[in-house]
Amino acid sequence: MNNPYFPVPTVVKKALVETSDRMLRTLELRFLKDEDAQAFHFVPGQFCELSLLGKGEAPFGIASSPTENGSLKFTINKAGVVTTALHHIEEGAEVGIRGPLGNGYPIDLFQGKNVLVIGGGFAFTTLRSLVTYFLHPENRNKVKDITVIYGARTPGLLLYKEELAEWAKRSDIRLVVTVDQGDKDWKGKVGLVPNVLEEAAPAAENTYAVICGPPIMIKFTFPKLMALRFPNERIYTSLEKRMKCGIGKCGRCNIGHLYVCKDGPVFSYAQLEKLPRDY
Amino acid sequence: MPFLQSLMDEYDLFAPAQLAEGVSVYKKIDQTEEVDLSISNAQKPAKEIFFPQSETMFRYEKAGKESRITSTEEIKRNRILLGARPCDIQAFSLIDHVFAGKEYTDTYYVNKRKATTIIGMGCDHPLSTCFCSSLNGGPFQREGSDLFLIDLGESYLVELLTEKGMAFQKNKFFEEANEKEISLAKGVEGKAAEKIKAAIPVEGIEKRLDQMMESPYWDRVQEKCLGCRVCTYLCPTCHCFDIMDEARTNKGRRVRNWDSCLSSLYSQETSGHNPRPTNRERTRQRLMHKFNYFPKNFDRIACVGCGRCTLYCPAHFDIRQTIKEIQEGGDK
Amino acid sequence: MEQTHKAIQDSIREKAKELLSSKKVDVIVGFGEGTLPLRATPIFIRSQEEADRLIWNSYCENNLATYLYKLSQFKVGLVVKGCDARSVIALSREKRFKHDQLYLIGVPCQRMVDRRKVKKAVKGEILRVGEQGDEITVEGEDFKKVLKRDDFLYPSCQVCIHRTPAKADVLVGNPAEESPLVEVHPDVKDFEKMSPEERWRYFEKEAGRCIRCYACREACPMCYCTECFVDSSNPKWIDKGLSPSDVDFYHIVRAYHQSGRCSGCGACERACPMEIKLTYLTQKLNQDVKELFGFETGVDPDASPPLSTYDIEDRQEFIK
C-alpha cells in the first residue's frame, strides 16, 4: 500500500534569494528518481509538504507551473524551524517531498473566460504558477484576457522579478506591478493594491478573480471587487492554515467540516461564506 | 489462564490491564496475569491499539548528502484485541471514516486494523454515566466485533460473528453452548439494556448547532474548562495528531503523537496569528466538531457515549448536560 | 459536618448576592453542585438570582485561583480555601493581578474528601453519598457503607496547617484549629525513607503512567506561562511523545518550577486522570525551601519568595 506520509527524495538544483530583506528564497527541486518525476502531475494552486529529515515538514504552494518541465519551484518565507533550515541548505542537498496535495485552482472553470489575478507580497507563489500556466502557448487560448495586479511593500520585496520583466514585454497579458513605497530606482507604479485595482477597473463580466495576499490586503481589496460587481462564486482565494499531515487526517487545518489541505486550499468566496470564520 | 496463553502463542494480545489500582489502559500483554476484564472501561480508550499515542512513522539515517528511510508500517504478527467494550468498538468505525476513507489511506492505522481480530465484550454493569444507547450504540452491541463475549459468571458465552471470528470455531478452549447458557446470556443482556436509563437527546443537534456559531453560549461553556487535554486524550473518537521529527545527530525518526484542539498553540500559525485565540473558540471547536462538522461529513455523531470525559474532567464538565443545553438553544 | 457546610454555604450565597448587587464584583467564582456523587464543579455567577447555585461541601477540591488569568478584565469575587488563598498571595507577589480586582471570600476548610479513596473502599459504582457528623455514607446498587471521614481525606489536606485563608476580605466561617491530622505527608514520609535508587524507581513508576494531558499544569494556579517549556520548539527542550526521559523531565522540571511558589493545595494530583502521585514531589520541595530559606508560600504576604528575590545576604557556599 502506498504510504501517503512517506516523502519522496528530491535534490536542490538551484537556490535563489528573491527579496532584499533576504527572507524569501526560491528553491528549485529535481526528483532523484525518474519514476517519481513521471508520477508527479499537478495543477496550479496545489502544494507540497517539503521535508527536512530531523527538522520536520512544512507545506508550500508550488510556484512553478506544470508547463515548466523538469523542476519544481517553491518560495520559502523564513519564519520557523523548518523554513529557517530550508534557507540554509545548499545546492545538492536532499529535500523530501510529499504531493501534489490540495485541490488547485479551478482552471476548467476559467476556460473561455477572462482571468484577473491579484497578488500581494509573498503570497504570489501559486499565482506565478497559474499565470505561467496560462501564458504557455498550449494554454493561452484557453482563456481570454489575463490581467495581473501584483503589489509589494517595496521594490526589493517583489518576487520573481525576472518573470515580471518577461511578462511586461508581452502583449497578451495586462500586467500592473505596484509598490506601497518606491525607491530611487523605481520607475513603476506606486500605490496600494486595492487602489490600483480600482483604477485598473477590469470588467467583472465573464471574469474570474483569483486573489492571494496578506489579510490586510484582502480586507481592503475585497470590497473593491464587490464594487466592481464580482460575484462571490467568481472570486477565488488560497487559504493558509497551520498544517501537519496535508492529507485530511490530523485535524489541524479544519475549517468547519472542511480541511484546508484536502478540500482546499483554494476556495471560492461563496464557499467561505458558508463556513465558520475559523481562519 | 491457559486460553490467554494460547492466544499469546499465536498472536500479539492486546487487552485491558491495570497500571495501578483503579487505573487501566489497553496495552500489549506480556504476561497473562496482566489481563483484567473486570473493569468497566479503561481510562485510555481502545483506539490506542490502532492509533497509538506515540507512533514512529519512519526512521532515517543520514550519511553525507544521502539519507535512507525505513518505514515502520509493517505489522509482523497478527493481533487480537480482547475485552474491548461496544462503545470503544463503535468508535473504530467512526475513526475509520477519516483514516481508512476514500481519500488517502492512513497506512499505519489500516495495517493494524486489518491484522486485528476484535473480541468484544458486553457490559453487564454499565455505569450511570454511560449513554451509548443514545448514540446508535448499546451495552451489548455486536457491530464491529469479530467475536463477542458475554460474562455468565463461571464462563463466557462466545458468539462468532464474522469470518475472522469463525476461525475460532475449532478452538480447543471453546465448546458448543447449550440452551441454558444461551438463555442465561440473554438474561444478562436484557438486564444491562434496562440499566442505561438516561436518554440523552441528540436528535437534530447538528441543525441546532448550525444556528449557534456566534452564540454567547460558547462564552459560558468555556468558563470552567481548564484547557487541558484529558477529554480529548481519553475520548475514543478524538483523533487529532501532531507530526514531528526527533533527531539524534545523523539518525532519527518521524513520529506522530496525539494532539488536542484544546491546546492553546494547536492552531497557532508561524506568523503569530491564531484563528482560535481563546478557550472560547477552542471549546466551541471541540463541541462543533463532534456534533456538527463530523456529522456533516459522515452522517454520524463523533461521540459514543462512553462517559470518560465526564468521569475524568478535572473541572467536572458533563457532556450530557452540555448536549441538553445545546438542544435547548444554549440558554444557560 | 453538614451543619458547618450548610452554614458556610448560606454565608457564601449571602455574600455573593451582596457583592453582586453592590456591583463590587462582576463575577463570583465558586462551586456548584456536581452531576455525579463525590463531585462539585467550579461555577461563575454573574447575577443575584444565580447565587443560590453556590454550594459548599467536602468535594470543593479545585483551586479556583487557576481561573484568575482568564478573568483579568473583571472584578472577581473568589471563593478560596486556606490553600487557595495562599496561591492568591503567591500570585499577587508575582504581580499577576491588581489588588482592587479581587475580593476573597475565605472559607475555613474542613479538609476535602479523597473521592478516589472512597471509590476504592467499595465494590461497584457509587450512586449516592451523604454526610452525617464525621461519617460518610456511600450507597450503590447493592451496597451501603459507612466510612469515617477522617480516614478518607486527601494527603495534602491531612498535613495542612493553613486551613483558614489569610488575608481574606471576608471569612464565612469560624477560623479552623490549625493542627495537622498527620505530621508528615504520608507519601513524603515513604519517600524520605527511600534510598536514591528506590526514590528514582518510585518516581519512574508513578510518572510512567503519564499521558501528557497537562491536567496537572492547567489545574495549578502557578502554571500560567503563555508558552510552557514543553511547548517550546526553538529551543526544543523535550519531545512530545511518551519517551520516559521526556516525561520524567517534564515532571521534575514542573515540580522545581513550583519551589517557593506551591501552596500544597494538591489540585495537580486530583486533576490527574491516571492518578499519578504528584504532591510528594512538591511537598518535599516545599519542606526543603522551608528548611533552607525559612519561607512558606503564601503565608506572609510581605515575605519575598526566596527563589525569585535577590538578597545580598543570600548564601553562596555552593559557589566554589
Image: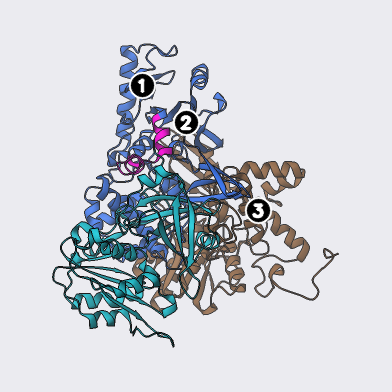
Chain colours: A cyan, B blue, C brown
Please, what is the three-letter code of the amino acid marked with disc 2? Ile
Label 2 – label 3 distance at C-alpha: 36 Å
Which residue is tagged 1? B165
Q: Quadrant of residue B167?
A: top left
User: Farthest residue toward the left?
Assistant: A205
| Element under disc 2 | loop
Q: Is residue A68 above or below residue B302?
A: below
Residue A44 appears at what percent x and percent y? 31, 58
- Which quarter of the rendered picture does the C terminus of chain C lie within? bottom right
Please, what is the three-letter code of the amino acid marked with disc 3? Ile
| Element under disc 1 | helix
**Is residue B108 rendered magenta in the image?**
yes
User: Farthest residue toward the bottom?
Assistant: A184
Magenta residues (range)? B94-114
Same chain? Circles 3 and 1 = no
Q: Residue at x 49, y 48 (%)?
A: C131
Q: Which mark is residue C252?
A: 3
Label 3 – label 1 distance at C-alpha: 47 Å
Count of residue discs: 3
Label 2, residues with CA under 10 Å away: few <14, some 14-19, many ≥20:
few
**Is residue A173 rendered magenta in the image?**
no
- State the residue in front, C269 or C54: C269
- State the residue in front, C143 or A7: A7
